[in-house]
Image (tube, helix red, strand yellow):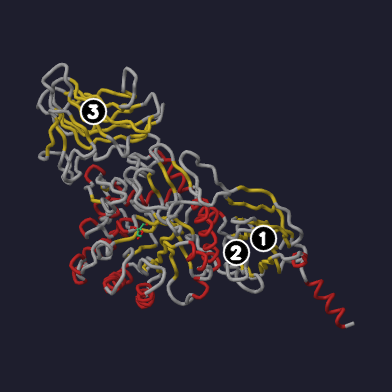
Amino acid sequence: MKTLLTTLALAAGLTAAAQTANTHELVIQTKKVGAKIQPTMYGLFFEDINYAADGGLYAELVKNRSFEFPGNHFQGWKTTPNVQMMSEGGPFERNPHYVRLNGSGHGHKRTVIENEGYFGIGVKKGEKYRFSVWARTVKPNGTAKILAEIADTKSMGEHQSLAGAEITINSPEWKKYEVELTPNKTEEKAVLRIFLRGQNGADVEHVSLFPVDTWNGHKNGLRKDLVQALADIKPGVFRFPGGCIVEGTDIETRYDWKKSVGPVENRPLNENRWQGTFEHRFFADYYQSYGLGFYEYFLMSEEIGAEPLPILNVGLACQYQNNHESAHCPVDHLQPFIDDAIDLIEFANGGTDTEWGKLRAEMGHPEPFNLKFLGIGNEQWGKEYPERLEVFVKVLREKHPEIKIIGSSGPNSEGRDFDYLWPEMKRLKVDLVDEHFYRPESWFLAAGNRYDKYDRKGPKVFAGEYACHGANGKKWNHFNAALLEAAFMTNLERNADIVHMATYAPLFAHVEGWQWRPDLIWFDNLRSVRTCSYYVQQLYSHNKGTNVLPLTMAGQPVSGQEGQDGLFASAVWDNDAKTYIVKVINVGDKAQPITLNFTGLKKKTTLTDGKVITFHADDLLKDNTVDAPNTIIPVESSIAIDGNVLNTQIGPKTFCVYKFVKNGK
Ligand code: AHR
């Protein structure tokens, strides 16, 4: 009898789910609302690699607009005779070169300069483009005329011009002239020409062409489709400006934020750290105009709702390119670097009566940007790093205890540097540690428990650069890599008490200008595409919830361990939407029956409005492309739940997000 009763009682205690043969029962303990998920949890990492800034996010269409590319000041330009490079008497101290258009001396000959843009100049039919130029007449009296023209050099038509406008230069003093051009045809690889009309010479400088329709219509603005893609992720944090460009090949070519603010015409050119780096993906003309500078980064962060997270140089040049002590700033000479950090906080947060706060106001933003986080050093290693960071920490803690400091654990996810730097970061009491892991499939599959065992007392984790890089030559964007990122991210989510930020990297790549892949968003001169990895980031960000919920299978976290049949899972509670959200990833080749069992709900509580968002691709090695951008996208459908138990099945190689609204207390 006792046995029978026990059996009955046990049977009653069993969920409907457990009665389903061979199911994987995922138990979600709704009563144990756990750690808060930080608003910064899922964010974005931006670096000017792959022509992500000039030629990408920064909407300027003219390359070498200030004629400052070193070596060849005419790089990116074609010129006729009678065009002279000048370097004395220009309007901008930090960009001294400009161009003199002299009369051709012949009625049937033209004087022209023609810009090739970044892999061409992309223009759309009927859209407005703002051409601007600083100019003066060569002669002290009279006027000069120029024609600004967008042209299609491949056209078989009678005219190559897509749009053009004449400008009269009416002063021997430098002035800015502006005109709008509206192309009559869409062309991905147009050129910009400036003709001198007549024989009266003109000097020209800072030749610029922007779409009028930039993100939020800003002048000196950003490419609308690309910022929209960022905004659509709803990122919690925006990290900039890198990556290795924070360090520069040499200290002199590090990203120097002070050169990136103030009037755009006078921001000096900088050599990009990725200029000429690789023989297999070689680009001889990769420079930073600094047109996309710290003001623009802060403004965009604000507009897309992300916390700004600048990373500053710690006094070290890129250690990959320059790993010898003499390349770096000596520890006792760090003051200018420390000043950069202190001044940056003033630029972002200071009153308009302070030096840097005033500049921010003059640039158009009197209100503070509310900077809260600051990274010092990017991917550093060795004792060189903590000995420098320590000096920063001391000063920052004293002057700005409100700012959270982010240190680095180096370029590797584990190993000698990592094992040395984490204890050092604890010793220095930084707030967060930036971890980087570009790793193959095997690593992502095995790392499902990475953060479960982390010390809860030390600094928090910022997974600051990561991506699944396919093994065996599959280092390109494809669905399987994105799926494994999704699987790994259950581990971030489950450990949201210590993982406070995570940013996939790199963010952008021009289809013709990339040095590094995979990347989150690809673009050409007119179009952009969101990759499978993008959709994984978006699914996590849109469904991040407010608190972690314990989710286990047979008492264990579901993290792709032996016997778990390729399943990864995590659960959150969204207190704003009163919704339970469960993410399940099946990395295996077979469909798996699963049961979601929401335990601890009161009798009167019901789960309604069930939804499942399914992300799957039949061809694991494919991704979306600019030609076929919507091939692999998440699909949402309704799903019915029986009481507090969902019996369902997850297909092979599939990421599902299940959502149920809680009704009642
Ligand atoms: O994201 C590309 C590069 O990877 C970053 O510049 C660097 O931090 C890392 O090595």
Horizontal and vertical percent position of residue 462: 43, 65
Split into 4 quadrants, where in the image is the C terminus? bottom right
Q: Is residue 19 visible?
A: yes
Of the residues under marks 2 and 1, which one precedes in the sequence?
Answer: 2
Q: Is residue 503 visible?
A: no
* Circles 2, 1 touching at the beta carbon (< 8 Å): yes
Horizontal and vertical percent position of residue 358: 28, 52
Q: Is residue 118 above or below residue 499?
A: above
- Is 447 left, or right, of 575 in this rendering? left
The residue under label 3 is: 194
Q: What residue type is labelled 2?
A: Gly
Q: Residue 566 carries which label?
A: 2
Nearest to the observer: residue 463 or residue 393: 463
Mark 1 surroundings within 10 Å by alpha-carbon count, few (fewer than 14), some (14 through 19), many (20 or more): some
* Circles 3, 1 touching at the beta carbon (< 8 Å): no
Q: Is residue 483 above or below residue 634?
A: below
Q: What residue type is labelled 1?
A: Gln
Give the residue displayed 55% in from the left and 46% down from the top: 632
> Of the residues tagged 2 and 3, which is closer to the observer?
2
The residue under label 1 is: 592
SS at circle 3 = strand
SS at circle 2 = loop
Horizontal and vertical percent position of residue 635: 61, 47
